[in-house]
Image (cartoon, rainbow, N blue to C red):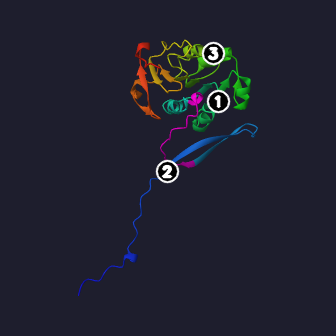
């Protein structure tokens, strides 16, 4: 007589191991408290792969590379020129970092709850900036001034930076330069601290980053 069959229903079910989400903490500020009050709140953060954001038009062509720039930098973020693409995204991903958004257009500043400033005030801000500076303000012709003055920041991101742009952009103050040649409008990352050459050829939303040293090394546009 053969061996009796096992009752499959009695066998313990195999439990699939699931990776636990990372624990993160954020600091909340209670502005209603007379002296201010900080409260540390822990919460679970699921581990997910970032997905490329939708580029609606040339105004937003910087959106994915700007998010990348935030990920490789640290410190405060200075946004020169607000918009429906960059401003909500920076507020979403800034974490504990200080974000200071300004614009030379009073209506745009009000719409995006940013600070209205003059070009002279912008120059003062970029001279003191030490973290990430995003340059995308009007007048476009003033961007070359901000680019030169921001040389002490850890990382500078400037939009509409293609060689054909009529802004006379001078990158000579920077040791490392990296182009994001989006077909609609280019964005360039530049730094004297972060070795951007390490990211040469990396793809962001299907577009390869291009490292260059001299102007003649840039891709045609």
Q: Earlier in the sequence, mark 2 or mark 1?
A: 2
The residue singled out by tag 3 in the image is 123
Q: Nearer the viewer, residue 192 or 112?
A: 112
Q: Describe residue 136's horizontal placement relative to residue 19 as left or right.
A: right
Residue identifier under label 2: 21
Q: Sort mark 3 into few (<14), some (14-19) or many (20+) by Cα contacts within 10 Å.
A: some
Asked if the residues shown at circle 3 and circle 1 are in contact, with their CB atoms under 8 angstroms apart, the answer is no
Q: Main secondary structure of the magenta part?
A: loop
Q: CA distance from mark 3 to mark 1?
A: 20 Å
Residue 90 sits above or below residue 19 on the image: above
Between disc 3 and disc 1, whose residue precedes? Answer: 1
Q: Position of residue 220 (x, y in %)?
A: 44, 18
Outermost left residue: 1
Which mark's residue is nearer the viewer, 3 or 1?
1
Q: Is residue 159 magenta?
A: no
Labels 2 and 3: the sequence-earlier one: 2
What label does residue 83 carry, if any?
A: 1
Frontmost residue, 88 versus 175: 88
Number of the label disc, if any, that sits on residue 116: none
**How far from the left and from the top, in percent, is residue 58?**
57, 28
Contact, mark 2 vs mark 3 (Cβ under 8 Å): no
**The residue stretch that appears in magenta:** 43-60
Image position of 27 with respect to 184: above or below = below
Q: Residue at x 46, y 23 (%)?
A: 179
Label 2 sits on a secondary structure element that is loop
């Amino acid at each position: 007589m053969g061996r009796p069959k096992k009752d499959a229903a009695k066998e313990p079910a195999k439990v699939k191991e699931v990776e636990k989400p990372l624990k993160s903490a954020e600091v909340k500020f209670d502005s209603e408290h007379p002296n201010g009050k900080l409260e540390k709140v822990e919460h679970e953060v699921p581990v997910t792969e970032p997905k490329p954001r939708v580029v609606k038009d040339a105004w937003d062509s910087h959106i994915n590379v700007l998010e990348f720039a935030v990920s490789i930098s640290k410190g405060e973020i200075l946004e020169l020129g607000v918009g429906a693409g960059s401003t909500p995204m920076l507020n979403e991903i800034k974490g504990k970092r200080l974000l200071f958004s300004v614009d030379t257009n009073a209506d745009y500043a009000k719409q995006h709850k940013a600070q209205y400033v003059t070009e002279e005030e912008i120059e003062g801000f970029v001279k003191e900036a030490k973290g990430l500076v995003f340059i995308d303000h009007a007048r476009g012709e003033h961007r070359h001034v901000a680019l030169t003055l921001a040389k002490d920041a850890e990382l500078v991101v400037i939009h509409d930076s293609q060689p054909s742009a009529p802004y006379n952009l001078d990158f000579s103050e920077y040791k490392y330069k990296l182009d994001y040649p989006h077909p609609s409008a280019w964005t360039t990352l530049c730094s004297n601290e972060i070795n951007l050459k390490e990211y040469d050829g990396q793809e962001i939303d299907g577009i390869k980053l291009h490292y260059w040293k001299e102007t003649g090394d840039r891709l045609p546009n």
